[in-house]
Amino acid sequence: MIDAAGLRVMKAISEEGSFTAAALALGYSQPAISQMVRRLEQRTGTVLVERVGRAVRLTEAGQVLARHAGPVLSALDAAEEEVAAIAGLRSGRVRLMAFPSSSATLVPKALALVKKEYPDIQVSFSEAEPPESLAALRAGECDLAVAFAYEGTDIGRGEEDMDLFVTTSLLDDEVRLAVPREHPLATQDSVHLDQLKGDDWIAGCPRCRGHLLQLTADAGFTPHVAYETEDYVAVMGLVAEGLGVSLIPDLILGTAHHKDVVALPIVPSSRRHIVAVTTPDLQRVPAVKATIDALVQSATQRPRSLVTV
Amino acid sequence: MIDAAGLRVMKAISEEGSFTAAALALGYSQPAISQMVRRLEQRTGTVLVERVGRAVRLTEAGQVLARHAGPVLSALDAAEEEVAAIAGLRSGRVRLMAFPSSSATLVPKALALVKKEYPDIQVSFSEAEPPESLAALRAGECDLAVAFAYEGTDIGRGEEDMDLFVTTSLLDDEVRLAVPREHPLATQDSVHLDQLKGDDWIAGCPRCRGHLLQLTADAGFTPHVAYETEDYVAVMGLVAEGLGVSLIPDLILGTAHHKDVVALPIVPSSRRHIVAVTTPDLQRVPAVKATIDALVQSATQRPRSLVTV
DNA sequence: CATACGGATAACTTCTTGTTATAGTCTGGC
DNA sequence: GCCAGACTATAACAAGAAGTTATCCGTATG
């Protein structure tokens, strides 16, 4: 019934002392104010201004409205400013989820970039494997996920409807074979997986394991999985001790490097595609967009792995 | 830019969880909500809701708006309620000014009536002679004046532009002649003023004195004014002691009666017209209107003076 | 007493805000 | 796996709100 515009007008009349001055102050024409007041008086069923001679004076009811105008208008302004801050990247929160091996360099670098560029954007971060992060994204518990897909497979394992999401390519991560320095193949430039059908294997997360089984199946054998761990540092340790070999993504070699482990390119090569995933709506949120941009930048600036091809 | 309606919609979406439910809650159609949100998003330049599957979820910016909605809307409601209270006579203030002799019975009775009928209406009251009360009315320092005019004269002494005001007749007050009980004319049913050209006179307020001079001039003489006082009790005392005679309005005889004073009708009779005066705008203010009504009622219910014709 | 200032009104335009009808899309049950 | 139900988006349209300009009228002021 009563709206903010009405209050603004009453306040202006109260402060300026005349319709004309109020109109000037608000950038309206004088009749606009006159009609506005009349409408308000009709709606409230009360006299709001006293027309005395050529001056106007607020009645008690009019004063009530003018008095309430301040708080209401400043609350509206506050809301507007808060939203504008979010729109203008002066504020905002991004809940990011990324799979573990991305959190070594890719994500921290991106977070640093965001913080440098937009100090007031809060990016919270938690680790999660792609299936979980996508579920969180779908459930509204996260705004942005860093996920990966092995070549030829879908990110969401096919179960998730990926058409709900939008993805931004970050980088292609080559999958290598980690062998101990003393391994017979360690000196080769590259290996075929069928050269390792007799070795013990170390498997990682469920999807990595799935990928391993896929590649070895393509190579014509089933690997003997001797150890399982999702911790790449542990994998490197196991490999270094000669307890097995493992597929290992190029990406983590920068941080989980081990002097007694050699990471060989495999033939045929296999890659995993690392992407930022979000929803079409959230991608238009400035803070989310800025974080994606930072991830892209972080991915392109990232030095290639220490063990280059 | 952002208005209360927008906030209300965002709040409803937040609470109801869907556009349709929000529309139902607010009594709108579903497309109305959909369009409202789109408009808000255009204006703020930000995504406010996340359309995920068949559900919607507020983004951070959307939550900001929904969060601000509560305070703003309740402040608006409070303003509306306050105005409604004034319109509905559950609240309100009337600043009343009345001339001294009216404050004896007419005004107190009216105030009591208002208080009984509308306990929450605050009627403040101060005494003032008509010229001052009308000036106060014009200056916005008072809402309602009880004034009087002698027959054949204007209320505002002619200087004031009475067309700015509206008047409501309260009662006709007959002007009598107060003489001591021992006065030679005290036993007559009525007197001509020229029978008193030799007496000493007591004059009251400036306007009363003007009236006295007018009446005596009409009767063909100039009175010898021996005393002046605006206090009718003093007038009665002076008359009772035989120090002079005085014109005295019927109205005050109810309170300032004196056993040694006789109030005689005069011929030709003279009356003063007692009216409630306010501005056209203020007359439409419920509390003012109620007070005027109470004054009218008080005037009609008032017992005629103790000394009836 | 004339002029300028301020408010009310009329007529008109435009924008906002709502409606209904309808299409598209996701979810969940059979 | 498909179909029904539920929800949102869009189009087309109607009504009303709100603003403009032009003009009139009253009042104060020199």
Image (tube, coloured by chain):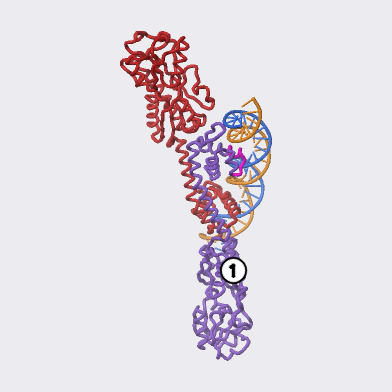
Chain colours: A purple, B red, C orange, D blue
Q: Check the image and report above or below for B189 versus A87.
A: above
Q: Check the image and report above or below for A92 versus B87.
A: below
User: Looking at this view, is A268 or A289 the one in front?
Assistant: A289
Left or right of B123 on screen, residue A73: right
Q: Residue B94 location in percent, x, y?
A: 44, 33
Which quadrant of the figure has residue B161?
top right
Can I make out residue A16 in this image?
yes
Q: Is residue A27 magenta?
A: yes
User: Looking at this view, is B232 or A292 the one in front?
Assistant: B232
Mark 1 lies on a secondary structure that is: helix
Give the residue at x 61% y 68%: A168
Magenta span dominant secondary structure: helix
Q: Which residue is mark 1?
A: A294
User: Looking at this view, is A27 or A261 the one in front?
Assistant: A27
Give the residue at x 41% y 34%: B122
Can I make out residue A153 in this image?
no
Task: Quadrant for the C terminus of chain B, please.
Answer: top left
Give the residues drawn in magenta, as a range.
A26-35
Q: Residue A202 location in percent, x, y?
A: 52, 83
Q: Is residue A242 magenta?
A: no
What amino acid is labelled 1 in the image?
Ala
The chain carrying label 1 is A
Number of numbered tags placed on the structure image: 1
Left or right of B286 on screen, residue A278: right
Q: Residues within 10 Å of mark 1 (few under 14, many from 20)?
A: many
Q: Residue A86 location in percent, x, y?
A: 55, 59
Q: Check the image and report above or below for B200 versus B3.
A: above
Q: Residue A187 location in percent, x, y?
A: 60, 90
